Amino acid sequence: MPHDHHDHDHFHHEGMSPSGHPYRADNDGPLTYWQRMEIAVRELLVEKGLLTPSEIAAQIEAMEARSPANGAAVVARAWVDPAFKARLLADASAASREMGFDIGPLHLIAVENTAQTHNLIVCTLCSCYPRNLLGLPPDWYKTREYRSRAVREPRAVLREFGLDLPDDVTVRVHDSTADMRYIVLPSRPEGTEGLDEAELAILVTRDSMIGTGLPRQP
Amino acid sequence: MSDWDGRRWHDMGGQAAGPVPMEGHDFALWEKRIDALMVLCGQKGLFTVDGLRRALEDMGEDAFEKHSYYERWIAAVNQNLLESGVYSLEELADRMEQVAARGPTYAEAQHG
């Protein structure tokens, strides 16, 4: 799947960041109007006593610590523990909290892939995403193209991600809202009976939890 | 009879569009800070995600096409903070001028 490459490419290309993206002009480019606004708003909030610089730094750290590895741990637990899986499908927020993940006030719903059904998540109205379990959404998730087409021609969209589903597999598309987020519980790959929970978690890709991909094969 | 189908611009589910662009980017520090400001302002009860959404949607399609995600977010955060009286338009304008005077790059301007 060409796409998984974005997250898991361990080859660092010349001029590319460790995640395989071009380094974005950050601190060295000319100061933009919107950067000036960010600096001004942040300083005013601090001066008014509403936020502290350490709170802002801690929030950035907490956000950076969230990655698809969190979601993968939840998926792997569900694969090995049927009672946990039942709790996850009943209330994904509570089951994720049980594993120590901060879900905030979100109502999180896990949707299970089976041999007959493939689930895909989107936010057609904006960019709602299970960020507490997967980190920030990839750029394509927020594009007009994905938001518009995922609900209209999901199979065509999935083919662009390298996933060509048989016609007899039902595709269910779930449209997220600000208060209700979905995460896909992918099917456990065949031939993984001998793997433990940590080994299974490595197979779970970000895209497999969005529905635009499948887990890796062992 | 209007040709309008009753949708606002952001309600784009089901519209025709081209191939999904797969390229991504790593978030810059100013973008991470904007994300953090939004989350913290929500936690402190200064405004809600619905307030953010309203401001984003009211910016219209032009802003969606012309400005990046976090550019639109800081505009929406600012709009909500102005409306709730956390600071005034004059305070914002003065501060943005001071920031510009610190230097031509984000690195030079980011700390007062």
Image: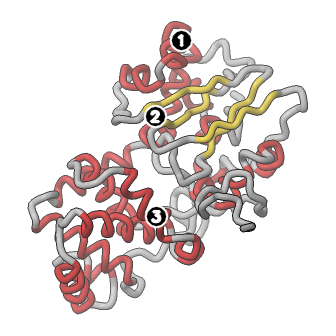
Query: Label 3 is found on which chain of the structure?
Result: B
Q: Are the numbered discs 2 and 3 placed on the same chain, yes or no?
A: no
Q: Nearer the viewer, residue A47 or A218?
A: A47
Q: Quadrant of residue A190?
A: top right
The coloring applied to the image is secondary structure
Foreground tag (1 vs 2): 1
Three-letter amino acid code at the position of disc 2:
Asn
Q: Quadrant of residue B90?
A: bottom left
Element type at mark 3:
helix
Which residue lies at the image location 38% right of the left edge and 33% below the top edge?
Answer: A103
Q: Nearer the viewer, residue A19 or A59?
A: A59
**Quadrant where the C terminus of chain A is found in the figure:** top right
Three-letter amino acid code at the position of disc 1:
Ala
Query: Residue A52: percent from the left, percent from the top?
Result: 14, 58
Query: Residue A133: percent from the left, percent from the top?
Result: 46, 37
**Quadrant where the N terminus of chain A is found in the figure:** top right
Reply above or below: A120 against A195.
Answer: below
Q: Residues within 10 Å of mark 1 (few under 14, many from 20)?
A: few
Q: Which residue is mark 3?
A: B56
Q: Which mark is residue A86?
A: 1
Q: Seen in the image, is B18 located left or right of residue A40?
A: right
Which residue lies at the image location 37% right of the left edge and 83% below the top edge?
Answer: A33
Reply above or below: B8 against A208.
Answer: below
Reply above or below: A186 against A8.
Answer: above
